[in-house]
Amino acid sequence: MARPNSIAILYVVAIVLSIAIAVASVAWGGEVEEVAKLAPKYGGETEVRLYDGSRVDLLTDSVAYEADWSSKWAEGVGQALHYAELTGKRPGLILLVKDPAKEWRSMIRAARLCGRYSIELRIEVVDLAK
């Protein structure tokens, strides 16, 4: 009996992971879609590509916002600082929250660091039923 080719196995694993991520994104609502809904409220442009290839989730005249689900608060803080450095604008973090009663720890942690590093913090409660 022939052994499966390891490249073929990696290919199948990559396809399965891609499908799983796509399904999860649809089920949970995508970050990109949530930011697009918020863009008029903040008066900014979404998915602005920077010279280093990174993309600011929402860029206004004065703030470069990173938007992340509350579980990714630490990543969001770092990205907000990075975008501010590249754009010359103030850093901002939009924390997307599904259930504030369950996600309070993430909100407090984000608020602590945002205060320490002068990052504008916005908390947006997302209703996934819409």
Image (cartoon, helix red, strand yellow):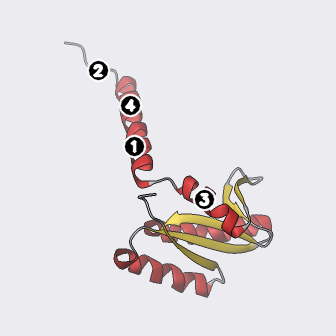
Q: Amino acid at mark 1?
A: Val
- Local packing at callout 2 (Cα closer than 10 Å; few below 14, some 14-19, many 20+) is few
- Local packing at callout 1 (Cα closer than 10 Å; few below 14, some 14-19, many 20+) is few
The residue carrying mark 4 is: 10
Number of the label disc, if any, that sits on residue 37: 3
Q: Are marks 3 and 4 in contact (CB under 8 Å)?
A: no
85 or 76, nearer to the observer: 76
The quadrant of the picture occupied by the N terminus is top left
Q: Amino acid at mark 4?
A: Leu
Name the residue located 42 percent from the left edge and 67 percent from the top edge: 98
The residue carrying mark 2 is: 4
Q: Quadrant of residue 79?
A: bottom right
CA separation in Å, label 2 and label 1:
27 Å
Q: Secondary structure at mark 3?
A: helix
The residue carrying mark 1 is: 23
Considering only order in the chain, which callout, 4 or 3, is on the residue closer to the N terminus?
Answer: 4
Q: Secondary structure at mark 4?
A: helix
Q: Are marks 3 and 2 in contact (CB under 8 Å)?
A: no
Considering only order in the chain, which callout, 2 or 3, is on the residue closer to the N terminus?
Answer: 2
